[in-house]
Amino acid sequence: MSGINNLRRSIVLKRRPKGEPSAADFDIIEETIPNPDPGEVLTRTLWLSIDPYMRGRLREEQTYAAGVQIGEVMTGETVGRVMVSGDPRFHAGDFVVGARGWQTHTISQADQLTKISADAAPLSTYLGILGMPGATAYAGVTEICKPRQGETFVVSAASGAVGSVAGQLAKRAGARVVGIAGGAEKCLWAQDKLGFDDCVDHRSLDLQRELQTACPNGIDCYFENVGGAVQQAVFNLLNPFARVAMCGMVSQYNAQEFPPGPNLGFVVGKRVLIQGFIVTDRPERLTEWRAMAEPLVADGSLAYREDVIEGLENAPDALAGILDGRNFGKLLVRVAHEAD
Amino acid sequence: MSGINNLRRSIVLKRRPKGEPSAADFDIIEETIPNPDPGEVLTRTLWLSIDPYMRGRLREEQTYAAGVQIGEVMTGETVGRVMVSGDPRFHAGDFVVGARGWQTHTISQADQLTKISADAAPLSTYLGILGMPGATAYAGVTEICKPRQGETFVVSAASGAVGSVAGQLAKRAGARVVGIAGGAEKCLWAQDKLGFDDCVDHRSLDLQRELQTACPNGIDCYFENVGGAVQQAVFNLLNPFARVAMCGMVSQYNAQEFPPGPNLGFVVGKRVLIQGFIVTDRPERLTEWRAMAEPLVADGSLAYREDVIEGLENAPDALAGILDGRNFGKLLVRVAHEAD
């Protein structure tokens, strides 16, 4: 579509969404594909990653990173193919990954791109299990949760790009892994394909009781992706010396006012550790994770699932969907076919 | 009083208090002073420490330590003098510290007691700045808050036994120290005698604004002793990578139902660490702290203040008072005069 003409399409922020974002909050801009200057690289975007953190970038106030300004191209991780390179480190046809935004074609400085191989694993996995979400799971599990043999590890948004990896890593560490996900289908997949010991549907009428049944020995590690009622239910079951990796609280990303949280009295008596983290604080974690996980993805030791939306113009709806849990697996926008 | 006859008086739990504890929740039992068996030591209690954690021991449900049973002697740290020793390590006249409960005289196993010297520092300080409260401050500041030169360190219950030490330690580490205390008198003392840079009265009509004024660069470390509205006000001002030592939440120790807490969304984006701890998990911390702090107390480098209640029978009221912030400094019950 956009690839067969000479136009670049970019999705820019039109206005800050109130509540759930929609296509009406963005504009699509078409312009002639620019030429790279010396030192620059022109890439064609193949895959765009859609991640919950993007909602924070739409806010007026800064979260951990500066927000997108009105009229600016929306940020996001992409996999692309080099079309024209003005830098000796890249050549036409190379596949690259980078945070290059919601565009069909991007002009990048060479150091904004990382070369990847199409042979090691599917290109799209560099945005999911081999990318920022996978590295996030790795950081939270190994540096904060530190699950030990026989401990109970709970992860919310268990079928998502981060949660699915976190749970598998905890399983490999010998923990009893219990997922929390939205709906029976996701739960079934987490048990069948990810190997989780149990999975609780957060839409259940009695989440607290079901979680307690799934965690008869309490909860030692919690990988937090959602917040809200799920967080409270998990916190009620934490064991002494439990570790909570605070990765995200997607249930409230569209909120205009944040609801109150759990009373923290238990943190003292139970000596609980609650630690927030952002994977990009230590970029070396991504490199380390990628090297470690590539063979495990290639040989099927680590499972993943992708949910693919076709066409850049559908990225805003995809973002709305992930915030509402409508995706099933790592959410990707296919901006152009790899063979195009 | 009790010392001039042959009776031992003990305060035992009569019923579990609902809300604020009072003398009516306890019984005073009088009995003949027992004789120590071989290996046992009879001590006369001089000082009894009153600490907020004691409220947890009155609850039916276990907190981090088992509760006191109905009819059992109430637990508490004491300083005493050996009257009769059935163990070669102790002799009549020795001063000892131990967790020997609300009694005028105690029978102890030798390993339940630690010998202290009346020469190094006043005996009562072994229940305060040189005792469990001081070691608590030491553990929370050095292992969790880790204040650095120029950072802003906030401590609540700033004039209390723990808070006053925590703030002084942070000050010695080069931090800007802001206390939160109940009333102008306590705040004045924290600034004048403890050397805090500022102090905010939590009863202020606009705590949030006053705290913000006192912390123009935000808050990097928080030593939490109170919870409630103070906690929320501090959390609103935490900087990225802030560390919160969760030592206690005294504002809710009398509560029958716990109020909701702060929304934890900020923990993710700001990569905040929240860590609960109990000093007795690592008894070596107390030994280490005592050795380090004795000379600093002796030469006046570390300041402290004591609030002394006369007579064991007033211990229940003293406990009610500390939970309501009516004490000013380390709260102690003088069970017998040192010279008696």
Image (spheres, coloured by chain):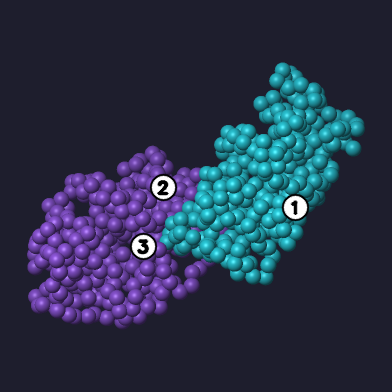
Chain colours: A cyan, B purple
Tell me where residue B81 sits by quadrant.
bottom left
Q: How far apart are the two marked residues, 1 and 2, measured between alpha carbons?
A: 40 Å
Image point 19% across, 80% down: which residue?
B30
Q: Is residue A38 left or right of residue A206?
A: right
Closer-to-camera residue (B147/A216): A216
Q: Nearer the viewer, mark 1 or mark 2?
A: 1
Structural crowding at the residue carrying mark 1, measured as other residues with C-alpha within 10 Å and reported as few (<14), some (14–19) or many (≥20): many
Q: Nearer the viewer, residue A79 or A75?
A: A79
Pinpoint residue B58: horizontal percent, then vertical percent.
36, 73
User: Is A143 on the left or on the right of B312, as rendered?
Assistant: right
Label 3, residues with CA under 10 Å away: few <14, some 14-19, many ≥20: many
Q: Which mark is residue B178?
A: none
Q: Is residue B39 visible?
A: yes
**Residue at numbered disc 2:** B145
- Tag 1, which chain? A
The residue under label 1 is which amino acid type? Phe
Tell me the element at label 2.
helix
Query: How many discs mark residues in the rendered view?
Result: 3
Residues marked 1 and 2, same chain? no
From the image, which quarter does the C terminus of chain B lie in? Answer: bottom left
Vertical arrangement, residue B129 with respect to residue B250, above or below: above
Q: Nearer the viewer, mark 3 or mark 1?
A: 1
At which x and y percent is residue B90? 13, 59
In the image, is residue A255 above or below residue A94?
below
**Which residue shows up at 73% across the image and 22% down it?**
A90
Are the residues tagged 3 and 1 within 8 Å (C-beta)?
no
Q: Kindly state the secondary structure of the residue where label 3 is placed.
A: loop
Residue placed under numbered mark 1 in the picture: A328
Q: Which residue is mark 3?
A: B182
Amino acid type at circle 2 is Cys
Return the x and y of residue A68 as percentages of the image width and height. Answer: 69, 42
**Among the 4 quarters of the image, the one containing residue A326:** bottom right
